[in-house]
Amino acid sequence: MSDRLRLILVDDHDVVRAGMRAILDPSFDIIGEADNVDSAIELIKERLPDLVVLDVKLPGGGGAAVIPAVRRDFPDVRFMALTVSTSKEDVARLLDAGVDGYITKTTLGADLPDLIRQTYVGARPVSPDVAAYLLDIDEGITSETPISRLTPREREVVNLIARGYTYRESAERLGITVKTLENHMAHIFDKLSVASRHELTALAYEEGYLRPDDER
């Protein structure tokens, strides 16, 4: 079985997709392409890639419309925006939708494979030309508590772990492997600066994320 990441490319320009395929084919398995929102959603749900590389500007609602439509049913699919746009509004819209990385097309092609791998493992890479105002965007689209700044999937993990479910039970409820659950927990611990599930549970109650009467 191949351990190469399986990608879908979404861009409304044929030449751009061809260029991406030429750069990425040696390192990844390109399992499909789409050029608009509806066809992208259908293709992603059908083939279930590890990661989707998509443009911000797409016919049918833009890249921000693709992510939530897929994540409702398939939360483990990763998304990396690859775009010419450095608009603060576009970046905010994609981050609010749950994009896992935001890279501009001025990035050197040789860097793309590594940026895709970073995105897949949850490192959330962004290009330098948008990173300067990333913090402002995060503050504008999320609430003030640390837990609310986690990804939707990470908040689902917190909800189960803080309510007393084991890693295996939580993984089964979320439809993921225990290893994936452990990876989520590592990111959660790092983001929240906690060292154990007990500290995580205490923080969840302190923030009002869970109430004492919440049950398994």
Image (cartoon, grey):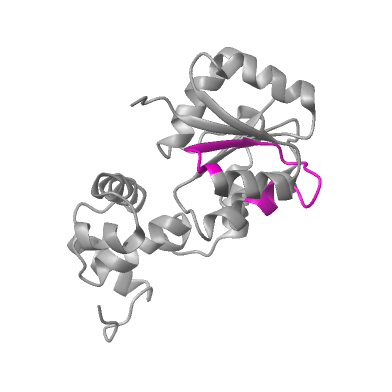
Percent from the top left, x then y, of residue 47?
53, 42
Q: Is residue 51 visible?
A: yes
Residue 58 on the magenta span? yes
Percent from the top left, x then y, of residue 50?
47, 38
Which residues, given as a range, are shown in magenta? 47-66
Q: Nearer the viewer, residue 113 or 30?
A: 30
Percent from the top left, x then y, of residue 99?
57, 46
Q: Residue at x 48, y 35 (%)?
A: 119
Q: Is residue 99 visible?
A: no
44 to the left or right of 165 = right
Residue 50 on the magenta span? yes
Q: How many marks?
A: 0
Q: Quadrant of residue 57?
A: top right
26 lies above or below 68? above
Q: Quadrant of residue 166?
A: bottom left
Q: Residue at x 70, y 17 (%)?
A: 19
Q: Residue at x 64, y 42 (%)?
A: 133
**Quadrant housing the N terminus:** top left
